[in-house]
Amino acid sequence: MINSVERINETLLLLKKYQITPKKLQIVYPKINQAANVFLIEAGFLAKEGMIVLPPLICHNENNTYIDEIAKWYK
């Protein structure tokens, strides 16, 4: 799931309410010196506890081009 970073707390609470366990979390930043705007979360129904927090994903270089990893996604 992709969601706005302002809704991370709400998302985690709702996942717990419906017995969905967060497994991976990654925060996404538009640029290196800007605040995060979205997060990516992977979860599983009735899964074992334990979540991996992945390194942050920074989308754009200083010149507003995509970083190499994201540019590959669009090719």
Image (tube, rainbow, N blue to C red):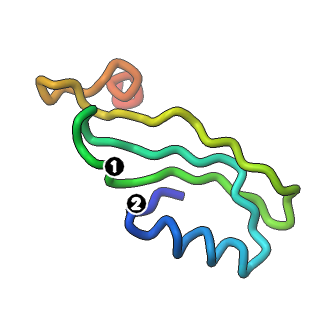
Whichever of callouts 1 and 2 sits on the residue coming sooner in the sequence is 2
41 and 71: which is toward the camera: 41
Circle 1 crowding by C-alpha within 10 Å: few under 14, some 14–19, many from 20:
some
Pointer 1 with pointer 2, Cβ within 8 A: yes
* Disc 1 element: loop
Residue at the image position 22 percent from the left and 25 percent from the top: 61
**To which residue does mark 1 refer?**
36
Locate residue 42 relative to residue 63 in the image: left or right.
Answer: right
- Which amino acid, by three-letter code, is at mark 2? Val
**Residue 73 x %, y %:** 41, 29
**To which residue does mark 2 refer?**
5
Circle 2 crowding by C-alpha within 10 Å: few under 14, some 14–19, many from 20:
some
Disc 1/disc 2 C-alpha distance (Å): 7 Å
**Residue 41 x %, y %:** 58, 53
Residue 1 badge:
none
Locate residue 21 relative to residue 7 in the image: left or right.
Answer: right
Look at the picture and state if 44 lies above or below 11: above
Residue at the image position 34 percent from the left and 30 percent from the top: 74
Q: In which quadrant of the rendered view does residue 17 lie?
A: bottom right
Residue at the image position 63 percent from the left and 78 percent from the top: 14
Q: Which image quarter holds the N terminus?
A: bottom right
